[in-house]
Image (cartoon, rainbow, N blue to C red):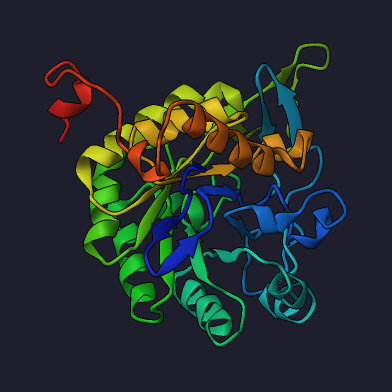
Amino acid sequence: MRMQTEVIIGSLKLKNPVLVASGTFGYGDDCRDLVDAGKLGGIITKSLSLRQRDGNPPVRIVETASGMLNSIGLANIGVEKFIQEKLPYLNSLDTAVIANIAASSIQEYCTVLSMLEGQEGIDGYEINVSCPNVKEGGLNFGTNSAMTAEITRALRKLTRKTLIIKLTPNVTHVSEFARAVAGEGADAISLINTVIGMAVDIRTRTPKLSTVTGGLSGPAIKPIALAKVYEAAQAVKIPLIGIGGIMTAEDAIEFLLVGASAIQVGTANFIDPSAGVKIAEDIVRYGEQHHIASVKELVGGLHVVKGMSVVESWL
């Protein structure tokens, strides 16, 4: 019997637990000839800001050992152009569409969400308070739990759709931030965003990125991401969406076991745009091989000896 793969995140029903991460799948139309997006649980759009952003100057992507550094700077077409040019195509897809929103003020977050709220085809929102690539806004919000809570509270008043807050790993205890957003009505938490990193060219003795530092993603950060998701799962009851170095179904299942209800595929999309679909299919194969009736049976299924984790002392 085929494993049941449906996942509930707030008011949103996903056909399977595999989403594609913001910034790695464009606005969906970039990959229309490469993958059947209808086989994904959902698409999270490239970040949207009130006005178009050109982003940071090159060089803004650097390959690293088991990962990549990016300093894109939230380059995007702006919310109005997205509504006019990208949303009609997204509406045609048989999958959930979650708009990722980035901003440099609480008012801008609210304005962008309000502009999207009345549009057909937006199933939920992921709020980016954690991007380390922009000097203003995201970094300050994402590393201050009170400000993160304030954003969540303001946005919760504006929508009944699924509201997901995307947290940064660049804090001491992510559980503090998880509690803050859960307490203000977030439906779910996605974590982790990229880890701050840098690369140096020893021939020129200069940073490889134009902005010196950027966001590290890919398999190199998976152990960090797993630990952060596990910590958040001990602190809150709302669904978690795990992100960080997921390249295979095995990676995805690890995140489910530590407490994630769904996962996002990011860096792998740059290698193979159909990575998310393949991972979704392989999760089903794993379930059938192990006689698992529903993907929900995997969520939080990690066997842990109580008292052995340092995370317990933080909670």
* Horizontal and vertical percent position of residue 135: 56, 50
Front position in the image: 249 or 155: 249
* Horizontal and vertical percent position of residue 171: 36, 37
Work out whether residue 32 can be spotted: yes
Quarter placement of the C terminus? top left
Work out whether residue 70 can be spotted: no
Is 44 left, or right, of 86 in this rendering?
Answer: left
Is 153 left, or right, of 7 in this rendering?
Answer: left
* Horizontal and vertical percent position of residue 216: 60, 31
Front position in the image: 121 or 182: 121
Is 142 left, or right, of 303 in this rendering?
Answer: right
Examine the image and state in which quarter residue 154 appears. bottom left
The answer to whether 170 is drawn above or below residue 120 in the figure is above
The residue at 45%/22% (across/down) is: 223
The residue at 38%/41% (across/down) is: 260
Examine the image and state in which quarter residue 148 appears. bottom left
* Horizontal and vertical percent position of residue 36: 76, 54
The answer to whether 292 is drawn above or below residue 179 in the figure is above
The answer to whether 220 is drawn above or below residue 161 in the figure is above
Front position in the image: 22 or 16: 16
